[in-house]
Image (cartoon, grey):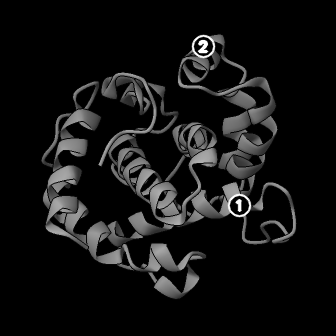
Amino acid sequence: MQVPIALPLEELVPGPELFVHASSLHGQAHVARVLVHAFRLVAATGRPDEVRRLWAAVYLHDLARTHDGRCQRHGEDAVRQFAPRPELRALFARGGVEAGDYEPIHTAVVFHSRPDGLDRRHPHWPLLALLKDADGLDRVRLGDLDPRYLRHPEARGMVGFAERLYAATDGRLPAGAAHFPALWAEAVRLDADGD
């Protein structure tokens, strides 16, 4: 299992300081696990064309949360507050995000937290479905993941991996720049053991 974004592992997820709300449920550890699931989903579904957009959408999706309860607006808030930041645009550009990628990224981030979603025929549906499934796989941390709500059969086949990744890493990895490299090493080990 290789990281499909050509950046140092330390740069692939936001640091704890970027999150509006310090959270153990929706903070750096959650986003890091969602990114692992996203990379695995891209490979499993044969959608390498979505990897850079999916990475940026995962990065942004929970940054603007102000609490851990139900919230349908935090995706829209993330796009408004964080997507225009020059330092994030520079990071995304170094990871391969192009100007034309921002519309689908923004759509996915805005709609990931809304139950109404998009029509499956919408051109941004594939990216949104990948983001929702990657995010959904980390519901194992809440104990309420229902695989029937996952959009891809490949995601439904990853529930066991999501459970093992959460059990092996929850509260055990350092916060900050070292978090994703440590999580990725554990994910590679678990992936080698098989789903």
Q: What element carries label 2?
A: helix
Identify the residue shown where x is 22% and y is 28%. Answer: 178
What x and y, as percent, mark residue 30?
A: 38, 50
Give the residue pinned by disc 1. 126
Category of crowding for the residue at label 2, using alpha-carbon neighbours closer than 10 angstroms: few (below 14), some (14–19), many (at least 20):
few
Label 1 Cα crowd, 10 Å radius (few <14 / some 14-19 / many 20+): some
Above or below for 138 versus 1: below
Report whether 96 appears left or right of 183.
Answer: right
In the rendered view, tell whether residue 32 sits above or below residue 16.
below
Secondary structure at badge 1 equals: helix
Mark 2 highlights which residue?
90
Q: Is residue 162 above or below residue 40?
A: below
Q: Which residue lies furthest to the bottom in this view?
A: 148
Q: Which numbered disc flags the more N-terminal residue, 2 or 1?
A: 2
The residue at 63%/46% (across/down) is 49
Residue 114, compared with residue 38, is above or below; it is below
Residue 144's x, y, as percent?
41, 80
Q: What residue type is labelled 2?
A: Ala
Q: Which amino acid does label 1 sit on?
A: Pro
Residue situated furthest front in the rendering: 46
Residue visible at 28% across and 27% down? Answer: 176
Drawn side of residue 53 relative to residue 73, left or right: left
179 with respect to 101 (left or right): left
